[in-house]
Image: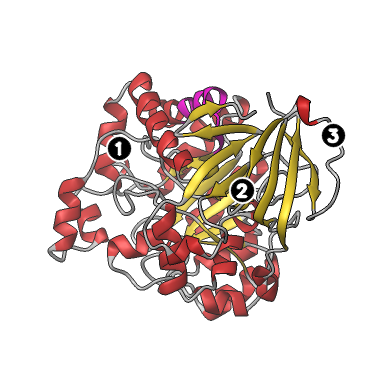
Amino acid sequence: MNNLIIKNAAQIVTCSGFAGKRGKEMNDLHVIENGTVIVTDGIISHVLKQGETIPVNEADYNVISAEGKALLPGFVDPHTHFVFGGYREEEFSWRMRGDSYMDIMNRGGGIMNTTRSTREASEEELFAAGKQRLDAMMQLGITTVEGKSGYGLDKETELKQLRVMRRLNNEHPMDIVSTFMGAHATPAEWKGREDAFIDFNIHEVMPIVAQEKLAECADIFCENNVFTIEQSRRYLTAARELGFKLKIHADEIVQFGGAELAAELKCLSADHLLQASDAGIRAMADAGVVATLLPLTAFSLREEFARARTMIENNCIVALATDLNPGSSFTASVPLLFALACIYMKMSPEEAVTAFTINSAAAIDRADKIGSIDVGKQGDMVLLQFPSYKFLPYHVGMNIVETVIKHGRVYQNLKLKTHN
């Protein structure tokens, strides 16, 4: 049954809105105390304040009594690489002894290490591992996730990753927004021929992805010693012509002009942004590009965090994401994400909640459908075991999500539960 009533929640943290929020708007969560939410046929049909009469026949609905608990929109993770083969635990120990991310990548580790393992993995192996990761993410309150290819770097494996994501989207409760990232790195067989590799992606792979509708977005790693500004512009422009929405890995390692390029091309989002310039930040704000920040990655790499405060004060739409991947961020820890955003990036709890709900929905062009508790949106919500959203960063590193609601269906420990 997709009919559900959540009664008398201590807080309904609606994050109300149908577009990404900027500046001071990010602090307004539109909280309703002791309210009730009704989901009918998987869609939110009523958001009631305390004392308002329930206008439906409760016998036709599952009912949850939510006294003493906070209800929030389901979390939206707009940047992950969750379909991959193999692991890189050895490289983590190398980083701990002082080797840099780019040093490891330049000697055949990093993305290329995962590429070898992903090419060798069967579709069934990738599906099983991807499902296991989605299960874990859903238990943390994530109800929609973006997934990137980019660990194939050849036609066959890129398509294999995207087909696995399509199958998971069809078979798993979580919604998956797929992104084609054929230009994640240059594989060994194309070294020294980066321009030709971009052409290969544009002419040989992208058209198949578009024809089979395997991805909504296209992404590229625009970075020193990876892909240049001009290569990134060419790749993303071609992607737009084929109907893809644009995303970009920008200014992660050095200040490179990626944020400015994202603004020029009016990308949906620019991600990482640890080294984004003041001019790039202002340009993204003016162009409406979502700044997707990945604090778990900076933490894992021992890098300075992205300048969230500067971006918010310059009127950027700021989102948060886990960047789950086997190298630089082998985690989808929502509790740690909130703690780092508030403690180290100096975001308020309200800004962090906005950044991982309505703004992260905007980063995948879904703010009209998910990311807030508004009438007409999908019935995707999380119920916390505490009465306030402020426990998310405060109860450091602990998962406080008690119940996950997806399309009006109730999941606890990822088992479908019936409430009477």
- Mark 2 or 3: in front is 3
Q: Main secondary structure of the magenta part?
A: helix
**Is residue 145 something that shows in the picture?**
no
> For the residues marked 1 and 2, what is the alpha-carbon distance in whole angstroms?
25 Å
Magenta span includes 174:
yes
Give the position of the N terminus as an image quadrant: top right
**Is residue 19 something that shows in the picture?**
yes
- What crowding class fits label 3: few (fewer than 14 Cα within 10 Å), some (14-19), or many (20 or more)? few
Q: For the point 33% across and 64% down, which residue is it?
A: 299
> For the residues marked 1 and 3, what is the alpha-carbon distance in whole angstroms?
53 Å
The residue stretch that appears in magenta? 162-177
Question: Residue 131 location, x and y as percent?
Answer: 42, 29
Question: Residue 211 location, x and y as percent?
Answer: 62, 26
Q: Amino acid at mark 3?
A: Val
User: What is the number of the mark on residue 56?
Assistant: 3
Residues tagged 1 and 2 counted as in contact (Cβ below 8 A) = no
The answer to which of 304 and 116 lies nearer the viewer is 304
Task: Say left or right for 142 vs 153.
Answer: right
Q: Is residue 168 above or below residue 262?
A: above
Residue pointed to by mark 1: 115
Q: Amino acid at mark 2?
A: Ile
